[in-house]
Amino acid sequence: TSGAASGKKYIINTDTTFAPFEFENEKGEMVGIDLDILQAIAQDQGFEYEVVPVGFSAAVTALEAGECDGVIAGMSITDERVQKYDFSEPYYDSGVGMAVLADSDITSYDQLKDQKVAAKIGTEGCTFAESIAEQYGFEVAQYESSSDMYQAVLAGEAVACFEDYPVIGYEISRGLGLTLPTPMEKGSSYGFATLKGANPELVEMFNKGLENIKASGRYDEILNTYIAK
Ligand code: GLN
């Protein structure tokens, strides 16, 4: 039976600040590419859901504890995560970038020696920062949300942060006083996640719906709403 037939309402957790994928607009509403894609897919496939913005690491923790049915949060499909989660087909390609203050002298990882670098708990950016921390001799300080992490760099608590390139790029284009001095590091594409084996029908509906909204042009329309091409 499909989610619609069983009358089930899926609880989908998301991040709090991860523009343009999910963020609060001027009216205090949660908006973004992830939320629009989910809505379009749910409409296409006829299932009910409720989105709960709890933050990224909290969303993943809740998923593991069975407290939600799925996570849509610009979540990268990493080799490590596919052991634990069932992901949908990828719906957006991403990568990781180092951001520094707009007027910073830092243009390479070498200049991070003996400095503090900010990263967001449980993210691919944090894993990347930790993977090169010893080599370049910097310390990684972890933050709960992307906004706290950006704030740490703006306030001089950290000299750089590692964040998903499209996300920090979007913030910079909207006036955040940071810059991306180094090329993007290869990262994983985003997927919708459920706990392994827990909601196979939901992943199936997501994939079918994704195919349909790509074919109908709705997917491109959503991206164009948030990202100027
Ligand atoms: N794409 C990154 C990851 O999955 C960050 C996601 C996020 O912070 N919402 O780890």
Image (cartoon, helix red, strand yellow):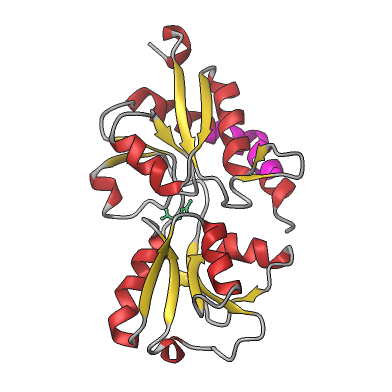
In depth, the one of 93 and 170 nearer the eye is 170
208 in relation to 127, above or below: above
The quarter of the picture where residue 156 lies is: bottom right
Residue 157: give x, y in percent of width and height: 51, 75
In depth, the one of 184 and 119 nearer the eye is 119
Q: Is residue 137 magenta?
A: no
Image quarter in which the C terminus is found: bottom right
Ligand 1's quadrant is: bottom left
* Boundaries of the magenta span: 210-222
Image quarter in which the N terminus is found: top left
Q: Is residue 211 magenta?
A: yes
- Is residue 228 left or right of 77 when viewed as pictured? right
Residue 2: give x, y in percent of width and height: 42, 14
185 in relation to 88, above or below: below
In depth, the one of 104 and 222 nearer the eye is 104
Going 33% across and 86% down the picture, which residue do you hit? 137
2 in relation to 65, above or below: above
Going 51% across and 80% down the picture, which residue do you hit? 159
Going 57% across and 66% down the picture, which residue do you hit? 150
The quarter of the picture where residue 65 lies is: top left
- Is residue 74 left or right of 43 when viewed as pictured? left
Going 48% across and 45% down the picture, which residue do you hit? 55
Residue 96: give x, y in percent of width and height: 47, 67
Residue 138: give x, y in percent of width and height: 36, 82
